[in-house]
Amino acid sequence: MSSMKLLVILEVINFASGYPIDPKDVPISSNSLGIAVFGVAFLFAFILAVFACACCRQRRDGFKEFTNTGSLTNVGFTNALATEVSIFPPPGTEGTLRPDPVPIQVTDSEQPSRPAHFPSTIPDVSDWFVDPDASFPRQQLFYQKEIGKGWFGKVVEGEARGSKVVVRILREDATNEEKAYFLHEAKPYRDLAHKNVTRLFGRCLQYEPFLLLFELYTNGDLKSFLRANDGSKKTLNEQGISLKLMTDVCEGVKHMNDNGFIHTDLAARNCLVTSDLTVKIGDYGTSVDLYKNEYYVAGNVAVPIRWCAPETLHCTSTTIETKQVTAPANVWSLAVVLWEIAEFGKLPYFDLTDDQV
């Protein structure tokens, strides 16, 4: 392009330095004068057009370099949202721009309390690593925003192969016990396929940090849905929607129990609502952070005492000891959830303190 510019400039100089035509040799007429003026104007317009095209091409090339970063190559689909970037770009890729880093990991002082029924022994999670091809490709995962945090680390909203997902990100400094429980508590969502149980969309376990991908449900958790629709309770009751919500929860819990799974923190806050108002058992791991007033925090453990069956707690004047949650204990918690739906998200035993409960 630079050589083309130089040729054009030399041609203009050569044209301007030519000998003038003797007016005696050529008769001047209005037509010939008009043609000469038009020719000069056309020449300068051509020069301006050449320079304009050169500038435009440079700008287009620059923008092309900006968008085609290494993190977006070989992905297989186009990211529709300009604000999205890859959480984990493919190893070894380089580019003039770097994608945003993985969200800052939660420190111990910031992270929410552990679940009350955190196991004392490390559960067996070897079946998660039997098939290495089962892991979702990290380079096809994009995040949009952080939506909360759990005992394990950050929770972000994102997109994977065109589907909206929520990603649980395990802290890189997690212990072996925490890694095992991180996978163990998601096992029912991996193994079960039921319309009233949350589905695990995928996992990334090839290297740390471990990631778990869940489907994103637009109406959020059942607790927030009930609160938001408190003003429409009469209509929802008359249309049978409240009864349907209760039925969905019952069917989801029954399916889990029938297949040997127990929910250790069954509550409206830990159920999700889809766009067609179907309730699914399961959550994104942010409940302790979002609903702090619904847990009794003892040390670094969060106990949902208002939902716990009496046989799952041993209380003294100074301590609270949690015991194993069984299927019958799940039925007790289920009854509390049904009450939450009937009362559109009220706090169980709202007229009592935690100690009184």
Image (cartoon, rainbow, N blue to C red):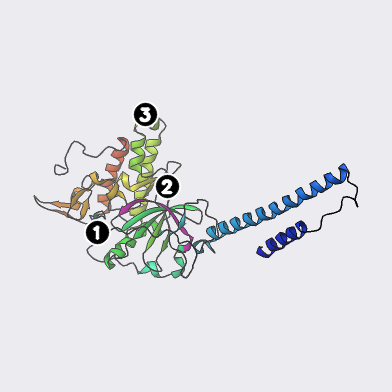
* Residue nearest the viewer, comparing 209 with 233: 209
* Residue 114 appears left or right of 127: left
Give the residue furthest to the left. Answer: 317
On screen, residue 279 versus residue 96, left or right, reads left
Report how far apart the C-alphas of labels 2 and 3 lie in the structure: 25 Å
- Eyeballing the image, is 38 above or below 71? above
* Tag count: 3
Q: Main secondary structure of the magenta part?
A: strand
The label number, if any, that marks residue 234 in the structure image: 3
Residue 158 in picture, x, y percent from top left: 44, 53
The amino acid type found where label 1 is placed reads Asp
Amino acid under label 3?
Lys
Mark 3 surroundings within 10 Å by alpha-carbon count, few (fewer than 14), some (14 through 19), many (20 or more): few
Mark 1 = which residue? Answer: 108
Q: Is residue 343 part of the magenta span, yes or no?
A: no
Q: Tell me: residue 171, above or below residue 39.
A: below
**Secondary element at image label 2:** loop
Q: CA distance from mark 1 to mark 2?
A: 29 Å
> For the residues marked 3 and 1, what is the alpha-carbon distance in whole angstroms?
45 Å
Report the disc number at residue 73: none
Q: Would residue 148 be visible to someone looking at this image?
A: yes
Magenta segment:
139-151
Task: Determine whether the residue tagged by mark 1 lies in a helix, strand or loop.
Answer: loop
Q: Label 2 belongs to which residue?
A: 217
Q: Secondary structure at mark 3?
A: helix
- Discs 2, 3 touching: Cβ within 8 Å: no
Q: Using a 10 Å C-alpha cutoff, classify the residue at mark 2 as few (fewer than 14 neighbours), some (14 to 19) or many (20 or more).
A: many
Residue 258 position, x and y percent, is: 35, 54
Can residue 191 be spotted in the picture? no
The image position of residue 73, as x and y in percent, is 53, 63
